[in-house]
Amino acid sequence: MAEQRDEREHDGRDGRDRRDGRGEGRRGHDTAALARELRAAVRGDVAFDAAARALMTMDASNYRRVPLGVVAPRDTADVAAALAVCRAHGVPVVPRGGGTSIAGQATGTGVVLDFTRHMRAITDLDPETRTVVVQPGVVLDDLRAAAGTYGLTFGPDPSTHSRCTLGGMIGNNSCGSHSVAWGTTADNLYDLSVVTYGGDELRLAEGWQGAPEGLRALVNGNLALLRTGFPELPRRISGYALDALLPENGVNLARAFCGSEGTLGVVSEATVRLVEAPGARALAVLGYAGESAAAEAAPALLPYGPLTVEGMAEDLVPENERRLLPRGSAWLFVEMGGDSPAEALSRAERLVKAAQALDGTVVTDPAGQRALWRVREDASGTATRMPDGSEAWPGWEDCAVPPARLGAYLRDFRSLLAEHGLRGTPYGHFGDGCIHVRIDFDLLSETGVRRFRAFSEDQAELVVAHGGSLSGEHGDGQARAELLPKMYGNELVALFGRFKDVWDPAGGMNPGVLARPARLDENLRFAVLPREHVDVAFAYPHDGGDFPAAVRRCVGVAKCRTESAAGAGVMCPSFRVTGDEQHSTRGRARLLHEMLAGEVVTDGWRSREVRDALDLCLSCKGCRSDCPVGVDMATYKAEFLHHHYKGRLRPAAHYAMGRLPVWLRAAAPFAGVLGAASRVRPLAALVKRLGGIAPERDLPTLAPSTLRSWWRRRNRAGRGRERSGAPGATTVVLWPDTFTNHLTPDVGRAAVRALEAAGLRVVMPPRQLCCGLTYVSTGQLDRARAVMRRTLDGMERAAGLPVVVLEPSCAATLKADLPELLPDDPRAAALASSVRTFAQTLEEYAPHWQPPRIDRPAAGQTHCHQHAVLGDAAEQRLRERAGLTGALSGGCCGLAGNFGFERGHYDVSVACAEEQLLPSVRDAARERSSWRTASPAARNWSN
C-alpha cells in the first residue's frame, strides 16, 4: 500500500524504529492471527474485512490511513483485552468516536476501537451534584436529552452535537458555540477512567493519584518551562495541556489528559459536570458591514453575559436563507439566557441596542431559532464549496487568537490568503477568537500540495504573531502537529514527546499524531484517487463531470449519522434503523472512495462491499438536500448498479420492478383477471418469489380502467371541452405517470377536476410516456436513456407548456435525472424546467383560485424526492388554504419506490416507517370519527 511505501521511505530516511511514534508498528503483521486472537479475547465486534477497514480509513479531515481491523468493545474489560492482544502483536491502536475529527487524529493503520456501537451507557446522573457518568460512545445529544429532564445540560456543544461522542470530545477537548459561557470539555470534566496501551487501568482526577510512573518527576523537573511556555487565551487546544499539572493550577490529571487525541490511553468512562440550562433563550442576530467589523464588535458583547457569540459572513449563507437575517454582510449570533422568556428577551434587546450594529433582530420562537442555528451549523459543510463551486478543504479549520485581536488577525489572514493565491471564508466562535475556515487548496497536484505546505508554515507564524493557538477546537492531529515548534518552541515540544513516552512507552497509542507527528502533507486522502477520467453515465454537472470529485463531496462531517430525523429531515433512514456506518451516506461515500482507490476495495465496479452497502440505500435523495455538501447517494447508487451489472444477470427485482412500466402496460387489458389471481395466495407467493418481491408485501391491484382510458372516454363525450377554462386560459400538461395511470387513476381524475375548476385548460401527452424512474433506481441507465429520448420525442408538441406531475418521484426524475443523463440534448433541460407539482401549478398559474375548505386534521408526509428536489412550500401553503391542519411527518415512509417491496428489505422498510409516519397515521385514526361531522361539500370534494 502507499502508506507502507511511505513508511519504509521514512524509516530509511531517519533510521528510527517504526514503533517510536513516527512509524505504525512492526512490519509483517500476522493479521489473521491478530484477528483470531481478538475474536477470542473480546465479546464485542471484531471486523477485519475490506468493508470494515474501508469505512475507517478517513475522518472529516484531509487525511487517510488504512487500519488493519476494527474492534467495537462492549465494556472496559473488552478495551483492556483488545489492548493486550494488540500489544502482544506490536500493533498500534486508535480510539475513535463519531469520526468527525477535522485534523486526522481519528485515522490510523493499526486497530481502530469504535466506541459508537456498544459503549454508550449514561449512568449515575445526579442532579444534586450536577454530575453524570458516561461511556466514551455516548452521543452528545443523548447526554443533553438525559440531562435536560432535570433542567441541566452539558456545556460544550460542537456543531456535530447530533453525532459526536463524549470520548471524541475528550480526545480533542472540544468546545462549541457555548464556550464563552461554559468553557471547553476540559473545563467540564470531573474524572476519567483510562486504560493505557501497557495495560494499566487508571483513574484520573485532581491530584497525582493515578499518574503513571515518572510523570510527577517529569513535571517537577520542568516547572520553569511549563510556567512560561503556554499562551493565555480561552481557546488554546494545541499540544498537551501540561500546564494543568502545575501546582498553582491544581494538578489536574484529567484536564491534562483531555485533548491528547488518543495518544496517551483509552478513555473507558468519564464523570462530567453538568450546568444549569437557562429557562428561556433569545437569539439576537446582529448585522455588520463585514467580517472584521463583526469580529471587532464581539469582545464588547462579552460583559453582557452571552451564551454564544458566533460569527459568519454572507458567502456561507444560502441565497434562500438570507431572508432570515438582518441587513448586513456579516452577522453575529448572540444567544442570551434568562429564567423566563421575558427576561431572555429583555437581555437580548438590551444587547442589540448596545451593539452598534448595522441592523439587528431578536428571535424568541424556538422554530425560528433552530432555523437560524441550522444556517450556522451547516457552515462546516457548505464551506467545502466556494461560491463558484470549486472545492475547499480543512487544514486551518480552527485557529484561535485573543478575542481582542481577532479583527486584526482576520485582515492579516485575508492578506496571507491573497499572497498565496488562495480563497476561504472564515466563520466561527468570534467571542472566543476561534475561526473556522475551509480553503481552496489544490490537494490533487504536487504543485498544489507544495502550496498547501508553504501556506501552512506561513499561517502558523501568523497565528503565533497574534498570540494565538494553531488549534482552537479540533486538535492538531496530522494537520498541525508538525508545526507545534513554531508555537511552543523546540524545548517544550521535546517535553511533549517525553510526556507521551511516560504514558505510552511502547508508542502504541495513535502514533504519528501530536507527539513525533507525521508530516502535514503525508497521508493525504486524495493521493490514491485516479487521475484519469472515470467513464460514467451521469453528467455530474456540479462536479465538472468528474465522478471522483462527486465522491470527494463527502468531507465526513457525518450529519447523515444522526439517529433521529430532525424536523422534516429525511437523511439517512437506513442508518437510523441499523446504526451501522456502512448504511450512512458517509459510509457509502467512503466505500466508493476506496473502490476508486483500489487498495482496500479491489474489485472496482464489481465490488461486493459497495454493492452490499448500497443495498439498503433507499435512493430517497434525502442527502441531496439534507447533506451540507449535497452528496447525492441515490445518483451514485444508480451509477454503481449500472456498471456493477453491466453484461451480467441482475437481481429478479430489477426485471420485475425495474421494468414495471412495461409489465403494467401489458397487464392493463387483463386487470380484472389479474386482480382476482393476485388474491390466490399460492399464485401470489409464486409471483412474488419470481419477481424478487418481499413475501410480506401484498401485490398492488391494477385499476379496472387506466387514467388515460378515462381521459379518452371523457374527451370523446365532449366533457373535456366543456370544462377547458375561459378563453385564453393557461394550458397545462398533466403527466400520466405509470403509477397514477395504472394503480391510482382516481388521483389523476381528481387532479383534472381541480385544475379545471381553477380555470386551467388540461391536456395530456398524445401517447403513454415514461420518465424512466424505475430504470434509474435499478441502475438500468442505458434503458433509462432510451426511454427518456422517446419521452422527449413525444413531448415536443407540448414544448414550453407547464407539465404537472402528480407523482413526486417521477417529477424528481424529470427535474434532475433527465438532464443529468441526457446533458447534450437541450430538450431535456427544457422539459426539466417545465415540471411543476400540483400545488406549484395552482399557485403559479391560478393564484387567485380558492380551494374548498376541508377544515380537518390530516396526517401526511412530504415525499422524500419532493423534499430533496422539488421542495414542498407550495404544498404547505395549499394545505393551509384548504384548512388542512396538522404537521407533516419527517423521516421516511420506508417504501422508497421498489426498495420496500424488494425481498430482504421488509424489516428495514417497516422500521423506517415506524420512526414517524406510522405513529402519526395511528394517531390520526383516533381522530377519524370527527371526519364524519365534516361538511358535505368537503366530503364530496374528497371523493
Image (spheres, rainbow, N blue to C red):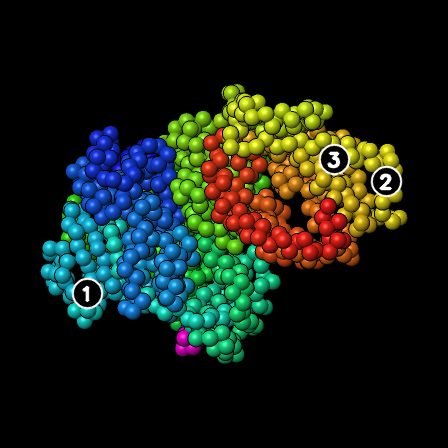
Kindly identify the residue that appears in the image at 23 percent across and 45 percent down: 79
Q: Amino acid at mark 2?
A: Arg
Q: Is residue 899 above or below residue 169?
A: above
Residue 327 place in picture, x, y as percent: 59, 68
What quarter of the picture does the N terminus occupy?
A: top left
Q: Are marks 3 and 1 in contact (CB under 8 Å)?
A: no
On the image, numbered disc 2 is attached to which residue?
A: 719
Mark 2 is surrounded, within 10 Å at the Cα level, by few (under 14), some (14 to 19) or many (20 or more) other residues, namely few
Can residue 16 be seen in the rendering of this structure?
no
Mark 1 is surrounded, within 10 Å at the Cα level, by few (under 14), some (14 to 19) or many (20 or more) other residues, namely some
Residue 764 place in picture, x, y as percent: 77, 37
Q: Is residue 601 magenta?
A: no
Q: Which mark, by number, is residue 707?
A: 3
Q: Amino acid at mark 3?
A: Leu
Residue 237 place in picture, x, y as percent: 31, 60
Q: Amino acid at mark 1?
A: Glu
Tell me: 586 left or right of 856: left
Q: Are marks 2 and 3 in contact (CB under 8 Å)?
A: no
Q: Earlier in the sequence, mark 2 or mark 3?
A: 3
Label 2 – label 1 distance at C-alpha? 86 Å
**Regarding mark 3 in the picture, which secondary structure is present there?**
helix
- Camera-side residue: 628 or 531? 628
Q: Earlier in the sequence, mark 2 or mark 1?
A: 1
Q: Which mark, by number, is residue 206?
A: 1
Q: Is residue 179 above or below residue 569?
A: below
Provide the residue span drawn in magenta. 300-305
Kindly identify the residue that appears in the image at 36 percent across and 48 percent down: 99
